[in-house]
């Protein structure tokens, strides 16, 4: 759908798109184009918004997100947004990869060599989750350790900082406010700056709608404050 | 999909649709057909429920929601439900407008003359948000003022009361409970009556599912109570 | 979309699907294949995830969920996830029923003889909701009694325990945490065991994403604890 198509329904929306989003938002200095692409793609996948995927997956490749990184983002979001959300994205991405001739050589082939695990930190996380939720669902607790924190998160195709950014965006985009505290802290430990987190919210407002962002802001505020101490 | 199609999977669902929704809900006196159309369309867009859009966008036009108002609802929900949600709706609406011969002359052409701003009220809102979230994301705070409250909300094509109704419906429909307090108060300040707000919840229950409405009810209850003081 | 299609975008995701989901999750002893199908189908409908529906609706039939039960699940979720979500599912199910030659004789024909109502329990529920929300929306309160608890829930085509399982899954899958307490208690009163509830969360993690499940776990924990007293 082109901007002219939008104009036939709402000239105002066509203008907001052109001026506020294309002309202003994407050019703001607080976040690189590559980061903005990661944020946008993550929000679209988290919300299964197929309508924007072809455009923004292509734009991500043009903005320097590699095929490997996009492949990892989809894999990551299978766990954080659900398998069907990832499959909606994969269905669109496979056609884009085919058109662009992206093949096996440009994708992370199995098995990969995992990044080193910070064992002390993971032991603390695992212990806390076990104590809290072991008697609620041991299956969830076990898969969380085995598939997520000692496997998925250590895959080398996407930097931990980017993996965290993807996760935080998915949480904000799907209204999962209660999970933001842990993952925003992790993101900042992984190198996401406060200015980038802040601008990520600005960017997300347009793609997820204002309410998702306003519901996330009190939590982000608390995380920022807790890190000042 | 016709009611007979539904019947081949669930005779019960076909009957509930015919009796409870078409035969009863839409004829209840608490809300006009026009308002019910605004509520339904807003819920569908907020949840990207493309399946109902063709039917309910046409019904909205038949129930007296003008092309201009539908155009403004989509523009409004770009901000309140996210750009991709609006684009799903625009894609379907553009075909309906084409079929019905709705052209430029029936849509708000740019630039529009904005409604007058209640400066004292906006200053209070802006100050509160700045104090609360300025250090979380100045970008969000600034766009909220510049694009939303001194621009979008002042566009003349949709009455403030209807704009508020659209917003409240989107919040309930997407589970954004934390944002209901501000916007329901604003809606009632803009002329939405308590009886209409109440019946809006009844109507939404069918289109968003009961849980969204039951999660919203404690907040609505508090808003009603706070306005009794 | 085949596993080989997934592999062209993410060999890792193809392997996780084959090993963790098909090879491990579905074979875990904590929940029967039939229950896993009910859980999966409910999550897909609650999230309008059309991409997985054809596969998982067929699998449900193969795992012993009857056409009548699937018909009732869709009818039930019209109320608990919203009419459009049910219609997305009906549209896909009607083609599957047509292909498999499932006709009127295998579907619950109207009118059905309702299961007996536990009048004391329903009176308590109705009274509590009336007291709490009667002045918020009498329409919601009335329809909740007339359409849901003295009608839908008493339909014989889906056992109350399964109906409860469907409801709990829809709540977790759509992030409606505030409604879990009532419905998980009801599910366990209806015969869902703690081990099954626990494994349901494990299963859902893959289909709804981890955050939905982690947001539900504190509530499930409280329900379990309250039933220990």
Image (cartoon, coloured by chain):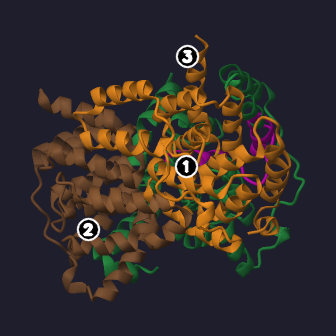
Chain colours: A brown, B orange, C green
Q: Specify start and end residues of the magenta stretch as a single range.
A: C144-172
Chain letter of disc 3 in the image: B
Q: Residue at x 41, y 52 (%)?
A: A208
The verdict on residue C167 being magenta is yes
- State which quadrant residue C6 falls in: bottom left
Expressed as whole percent of the image width and height from the top left, the position of residue C197 reads: 51, 44
Query: Label 2, on which residue?
Result: A72
Q: Where in the figure is residue B35, as x and y percent of width and height?
A: 70, 44
In the picture provided, is A202 more to the left or to the right than C132?
left
In this view, the mark in front (2 or 3): 3
Q: Secondary structure at mark 2?
A: helix
* Residue at point 51%, 48% (across, down): C174
Q: Residue A77: x and y, percent?
A: 34, 60
Q: Is residue A89 magenta?
A: no
Kindly indicate whether the residues beneath marks 2 and 3 are on one polypeptide chain. no
SS for callout 1: helix
Residue holding disc 3: B226
Q: Residue at x 23, y 39 (%)?
A: A127
**Magenta stretch, overall SS:** helix
Q: Nearer the viewer, residue C219 or C33?
A: C219
Question: Height in image: C45 above or below C182?
Answer: below
Instruction: Give me the chain letter of mark 1.
Output: C
Residues behind callouts 3 and 1 on a single chain:
no
Q: Residues within 10 Å of mark 1 (few under 14, many from 20)?
A: many
Q: Quadrant of the C terminus of chain A?
A: top left
C86 displayed left or right of A227: right
Asked if badge 1 and badge 2 are on a common chain, one would say no
Toward the viewer: C20 or A175?
A: A175
Which chain does the numbered disc 2 sit on?
A
Q: According to the image, label 1 marks what residue?
A: C169
């Amino acid at each position: 759908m082109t901007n002219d198509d939008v104009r036939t329904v709402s000239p105002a929306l066509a203008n907001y798109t052109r001026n506020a989003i294309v002309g202003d938002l994407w050019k703001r200095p607080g976040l690189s184009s590559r980061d903005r692409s990661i944020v946008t793609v993550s929000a679209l996948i988290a919300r299964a918004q197929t309508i924007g995927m072809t455009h923004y997956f292509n734009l991500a490749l043009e903005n320097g997100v590699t095929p490997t990184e996009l492949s990892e983002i989809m894999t990551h979001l299978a766990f954080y947004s659900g398998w069907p959300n990832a499959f909606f994205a994969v269905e669109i991405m496979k056609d884009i990869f085919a058109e662009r001739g992206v093949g096996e050589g440009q994708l992370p082939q199995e098995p990969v060599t995992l990044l080193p695990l910070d064992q002390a930190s993971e032991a603390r996380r695992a212990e806390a989750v076990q104590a809290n939720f072991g008697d609620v669902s041991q299956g969830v607790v076990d898969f969380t350790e085995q598939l997520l924190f000692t496997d998925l998160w250590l895959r080398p195709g996407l930097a931990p900082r980017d993996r965290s950014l993807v996760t935080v965006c998915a949480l904000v985009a799907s209204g999962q406010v209660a999970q933001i505290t842990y993952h925003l802290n992790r993101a900042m430990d992984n190198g996401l700056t406060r200015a980038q987190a802040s601008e990520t919210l600005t960017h997300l407002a347009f793609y997820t709608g204002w309410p998702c962002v306003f519901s996330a802001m009190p939590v982000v505020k608390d995380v920022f404050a807790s890190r000042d101490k």
